[in-house]
Image (tube, rainbow, N blue to C red):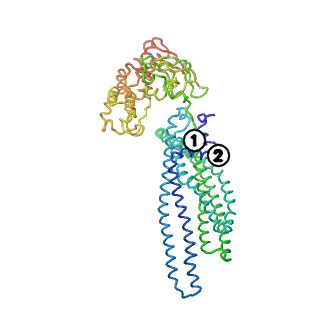
Amino acid sequence: MSSTDLDPEEDDLVSSKAWDNAILLRLARYAKPHARLFYASFGVLAMLFMLDMLGPWIWRHALDGPVHAAVSARERDPAADIGTFVRQFWYWVGGYLLLVALSVVFRYHEVAQLNRTGQTVIADLRSRLFRHMQSLDLVFFDRRPTGALVTRVTSDVENLNEMFTSGLVVLLFDFVKIVGVLAFLYWLNWRLALVVTAGTPFLIGVSLVFRGGARRAHRAVRARLSRLNGYLQEVLQGIRVVQVFRREKAVSARFAQHLDGYLAANLKTIFLFALFFPVIDFVVSAIQGTTLWSGGLSIAGAQLSYGEFVQFWFYLALLVAPIRELGERYNILQSAFASAERIFDILDTRPTLEPEREKTSPPGFSTLPLRGHVRFEHVSFSYTEGTEVLHDLSFEIRPGETVAVVGATGAGKSTLVNLLLRFYEPSSGHITIDGHDLTELDPARLRRAVGLVLQEDFLFAGTVKENLILERESVTEESLEEALAASRADELVARLPGGLAHPVAERGATFSTGERQLLAIARALAGDPRIVVLDEATASVDSNTEAQIESATRKLLEGRSALVIAHRLSTVRRATRILVLHRGKLREQGTHAQLLAQDGIYARLHRLQFAESAG
């Protein structure tokens, strides 16, 4: 079963059984183009490691050098002058302070470099994820909450940033550091080093037990957060309906359920880490205590000097620090793995359209003038299996014709638009333009040839001009002016304080429904399309605005093939032909006069609408 067939809530859990190394290898492919940044990060970490290793070496030579010499001199002669030893000691202290200063500088570069690396990698990944989501079919978005998808592009990708900055890179270098320090401990004193390594199996065992539970817990947290965000976005988008129907209590109760699930998932994660860290600290403390006891005996037996023990103790701290932080690194990695699974679930989703047939259009389609001859041949379609929306539908739109489609709600009118633009594939039958099957055409070129105005069209945040052009190279200043004039939107633009530079709020909230429709019509016509599709373009406008659109479209549709879908029969009287859909089947077709004379479905719809208008 493909991911597009999954229930949204089940899909949110992402029950992938991929091993960690498989996920890491896949993430490495996204990080590979930025290898230089990772090399620089390892370089900074290596410099810090060298500085950290030099510190204990300075302490050892300071203690076993001037300090030990001064103590020995006073033991031989309590009145001995130790000024020379004190000056030598200050040289070592000065060297150590210089080392600390250099460490501060490299600490800054560590933070800056690691974050720069992580942000660069996830910026590419987020961009790739967003581009991939835009390439997916509408079926994908029909079956997934918008909030869940937003979570994957924002929160889930951000988790990977933390993995690259303070998780994976640092963890890999921590292993290098552990091996290097351990080797140095054996070089200093193999007996004490054996004491240290005796506790290592316990640390590894605790980490392995913790690993599986943390992975599952973090996956549950990401899934619950996705559901919470999805429901929150749904409520905010429908806040008017919530308030009008006084649904605040019911909505709050449902939100509380999602919140309780998210809280429970987080509490489970907190429990795991609350248990893990004390256990790790206990094992680490046991290793340190055993080392102190064994080192003390070695000093007492003159087998180890004070300076050597201090150097060993500092190196032990360098060894213990990454081990102690191993849990936090796992925390970051497991959260990132859970997010990566969800991100790869999206990236692994393939469009249902056939990619190999989308790369090129037939010769001449993009270069020769498009005639706009559209044919539907025995087309059937179902959004869900077993529920047919269109059944054996056949009709054509000849070049320059205006064909209108009418019918009751749910008859399948808007589905025709979705199929013509190849947002969905017919279950059976064929759709052709100028004799070319849609499956042979590049969807991008196909959609550029069509001017579309939806029932509830969308305006993006930006300026009016940006919304009209939408970065189409074919739209010139001249064609834009002609489109504004033809759609009668020029009067609207003239009233705006900034004209075409007037800002547009999100979703065009500062414009009325009629104004948005006028701008949407101007946007569709600015590219001089050969095929125009008006999907309920006047369904939500007042009579005055409807009259403006009608008078404009009469001239606009001259010489263009047009598919007009409308509830208001007054908008389709002048169509070349009118198709009447009823329960997904083509029941009647003809001109306005012919259909009225038949006294069938169209005539009944006409009588009902105009009786309501008269009433």
> Label 2, on which residue?
19
Disc 2 versus disc 1: distance between alpha carbons?
14 Å
Which element type, helix, strand or loop, lies under badge 2? loop
What is the tally of numbered marks visible in this picture?
2
Q: Are marks 2 and 1 in contact (CB under 8 Å)?
A: no
Residue 448 % position (x, y): 43, 28
In the figure, 598 relative to 101: above or below?
A: above
Residue 580 % position (x, y): 49, 18
Instruction: Inspect the image, locate mark 1, and give the three-letter code of the amino acid beneath it.
Output: Phe
Q: Nearer the viewer, residue 230 or 318?
A: 318
Callout 1: few (<14), some (14-19), or many (20+) C-alpha neighbours within 10 Å? some
Q: Nearer the viewer, residue 528 or 165?
A: 165
Callout 2: few (<14), some (14-19), or many (20+) C-alpha neighbours within 10 Å? few
Identify the residue at horizontal 40%, vertical 37% (top origin).
Answer: 508
- Judge left or right: residue 170 versus residue 545: right
Instruction: Indicate the quadrant containing the N terminus: top left, top right, bottom left or bottom right.
Output: top right
Residue 257 visible: no
Which element type, helix, strand or loop, lies under badge 1? helix
Which quadrant of the figure has residue 181?
A: bottom right
Residue 310 % position (x, y): 60, 71
Identify the residue at horizontal 45%, vertical 26% (top origin).
Answer: 535
- Judge left or right: residue 221 versus residue 112: right
Q: Which mark is residue 344?
A: 1
- Judge left or right: residue 464 versus residue 295: left
In the figure, 289 relative to 440: above or below?
A: below
Q: Earlier in the sequence, mark 2 or mark 1?
A: 2
Residue 142 % position (x, y): 54, 34
